[in-house]
Amino acid sequence: MLALYFDGDLRLLEVPKPEPGPGEVLIRVHLAGVCRTDIEVLHGYRPFTGILGHEFVGVVEGPPDSPWLGRRIVGEINLACGSCPWCRQGLARHCRSRRVLGIQGRDGVFAQFLTLPAANLHAVPDNLPDEAAVFTEPLAAALAVTGSISGLAESRVLVVGDGPLGLLSAFVLTLQGAEVHLAGHYAEHLALAEPYGVKGFLETDLRGRDYEVVVEASGSPRGLALALERVRPRGTVILKSTYKGQVPLDPATLVVPEVRLVGSRCGPFPAALRLMARGWIDPQPLISQRFPLSQACVAMAQAQQPGVLKVLLDCKAEGG
């Protein structure tokens, strides 16, 4: 099968089709999405060798006796041990020995096929097109923001970053009843949030330091500095960005105003699928370009260009 492989160099390779192990299924990938984390892996965010990618929608093709056979699915990206204290508490995404699709110890989805434990699968509603379902993982990550803090309906919230994760975070926050502002670099990106009642600002035009909650989803070290500048005393900054390198942090920016800094990662797939199936959130306007898997290297380069939102890989188009 064709796959996008990374071992310090990025290459398209013909590799053997994977065989599902006990409790696993074989999945034919339809569409895969390029995430900012995939780009950061290229830059050394994590030491990884293998097939990249973790956002996908596909169809189960084996084994023949699987109850999932023929069903269109999306899949959770964390593969946990299932027996450690974190797993037993329902926090498998924090399992110390977990593997993560295309990021840590497990081949990802930029390929024609992959295997996953059946326990990781979620059925895609019939009325949801692949072009929306492929956003399930990032939308679920955006939904995790709403579980990080209570009282959002009474809050004035700023989202820093107008990329896909920032936009999706802004969308879901409005569903919680919050007054949501979005700060970014591209007027055309900010306009995508207007139908959800989000007020957009170019970062250069953002004024004031009075937000109860600031969500940092910029994918840039500068985003945290801006978030800490704009949060009110005793407010909360929710950090979503991951990238290579470290960010200098003056403890006084947290201690003196008594600000809470909260990390937020993965979220609920079922809720993300319901929101899209009901038409409450439509992520498809965030698609910038679509490439066949055979042009995956070009797609990865394009995804790194300024102003590009979601780049998709069409893995079904390759046949096989």
Image: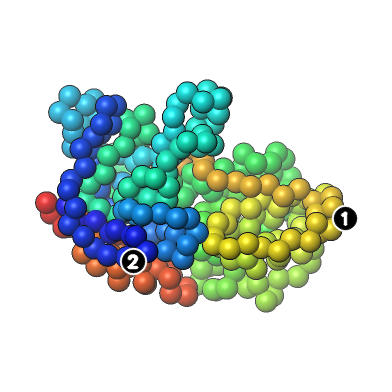
Instruction: Identify which residue, 262 or 132, lies in the foreground.
Output: 262
Instruction: Identify which residue, 22 or 317, lies in the foreground.
Output: 22
Furthest-left residue in this view: 320
Q: Amino acid at mark 2?
A: Asp
Tag 1 residue: 256
Residue at image location 47% in from the left, 73% down from the top: 307
Q: Is residue 155 above or below residue 252?
A: above
Spatial CA span between label 1 and label 2: 45 Å
Mark 1 residue crowding within 10 angstroms, few (<14) / some (14–19) / many (20+): few
Q: Comparing marks 1 and 2, which lies closer to the viewer?
A: 2
Residue 245, image x and y in percent?
Answer: 58, 63
Is any part of residue 135 visible from this angle? no
Mark 2 residue crowding within 10 angstroms, few (<14) / some (14–19) / many (20+): few
Residue 241, image x and y in percent?
Answer: 57, 57
Residue at image location 50% in from the left, 72% down from the top: 188
Tag 2 residue: 9
